[in-house]
Image (cartoon, rainbow, N blue to C red):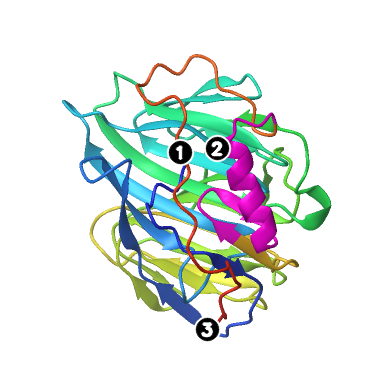
Amino acid sequence: MSNLETAPREVACGATRFDGVEVLEPREVPLGGPRALPVRRTLPQRERSLVGAWCFADHYGPQDVQGTEGMDVPPHPHTGLQTVSWLFRGEIEHRDSAGVHQTVRPGELNLMTAGAGICHSEVSTPSSTILHGVQLWVALPDSDRDAARDFEHYAPEPFSRGDATLRVFLGELAGERSPVHTFTPLLGAQIDLAAGCTLELGVDPAFEHGVLLDLGRVDVDGRALESGQLAYVGTGSRSLRLHNAAGLAARVLLLGGTPFPDELLMWWNFVGRSHEEIVEYRRQWQDGDDRFGAVSGYTGSVTHLPAPPLPATRLRPRRRR
């Protein structure tokens, strides 16, 4: 997934402590231009830029893409992160400079490790009439941010806890563990709640958690969420209570992890540590440097997504609340 904002703001990321439940509102961003797929972005923002190592969250659909271009994101770069693709409906074709060609389908995880540098494209398939899902980024710690390019695909088995159905695609929850490797302790799970369902989940008190509401209305530890909002719960909690009081089914994504240890600087599709690093990443991408490689098989009209202009001022960490 690319951040296609024409004037992206730098975001400095670091850990903070918060007691209680904080609700983050999404903002709408056009993915690929004004007539393209709109997404709702809950991370990063001024109020909070990280949940564990989760540093970017785009939530889109359900969007009818019949007769439109759907999703068509040309080859674009990444550094210092992993991308997580998770769908509820539709299909997306992924290609990257590690030579991977993989279709993303509902209920299946695509995890791409950028490390020192990668580029990839994402295009919805012709059979996709509705697109609905999330695109997420995970920041890599200092020790692993220059790791080699990598890719993992995993389809977790759904399991039930009362009137809830869970799919754990990263980490461990309710006795189920994903085999997918992460560089910091992480949790990622889809939870479907039947009408009237209350689910008490045991969680790791060393983790901070984010609950992103996709469908319906759900209370998180007594705090009501509307669709598209993200509830943040800080470290120290040993349990999480999800309650669907509505008469229809609801669905959430539960994201979690230990507070990220490093200070980050994010700009466009790059995660770095300083202004100089970001400037160099941009130059290398614009110059076609081998750091990012090349994508084979993409047939769109734009073969190389250009980086937006850098701001006139120095990229600096933004003060956290």
- Image check: 32 left or right of 10? left
The image quarter in which residue 220 lies? bottom left
Tell me the kind of residue under disc 3.
Gly
Query: Any magenta on residue 187?
Result: no
Residue neighbourhood size for the residue with mark 3, other residues' Cα within 10 Å, grouped as few (<14), some (14–19), many (≥20) = few
> Which of 79/195 is in front?
79
For label 2, the residue is 286
Query: Any magenta on residue 274?
Result: yes
Lower position in the chain sequence, tag 3 or tag 1: 3
The C terminus is located in which quarter?
Answer: bottom right
- Image check: 9 left or right of 216? right
> Which of 285/23 is in front?
285
- On screen, 276 above or below 154? below
Whether residue 82 is visible, yes or no, is: no
Marks 2 and 3 in Cβ contact (< 8 Å): no
Marks 1 and 2 in Cβ contact (< 8 Å): yes
For label 3, the residue is 20
For label 1, the residue is 306
- On screen, 78 above or below 250? above
Q: Position of residue 179 (x, y in %)?
A: 72, 38
Whether residue 291 is visible, yes or no, is: yes
Q: CA distance from mark 3 to mark 1?
A: 42 Å
Tell me the kind of residue under disc 2.
Gln
Lower position in the chain sequence, tag 1 or tag 2: 2
Q: Nearer the viewer, mark 3 or mark 1?
A: 1
- On screen, 180 above or below 23? above
- On screen, 46 above or below 62? below
Tag 1's secondary structure? Answer: loop
Q: Position of residue 124 (x, y in %)?
A: 35, 27
Read off the magenta span. 266-290
Q: CA distance from mark 2 to mark 3?
A: 44 Å
Residue at 60%, 31% in the rendered image? 154
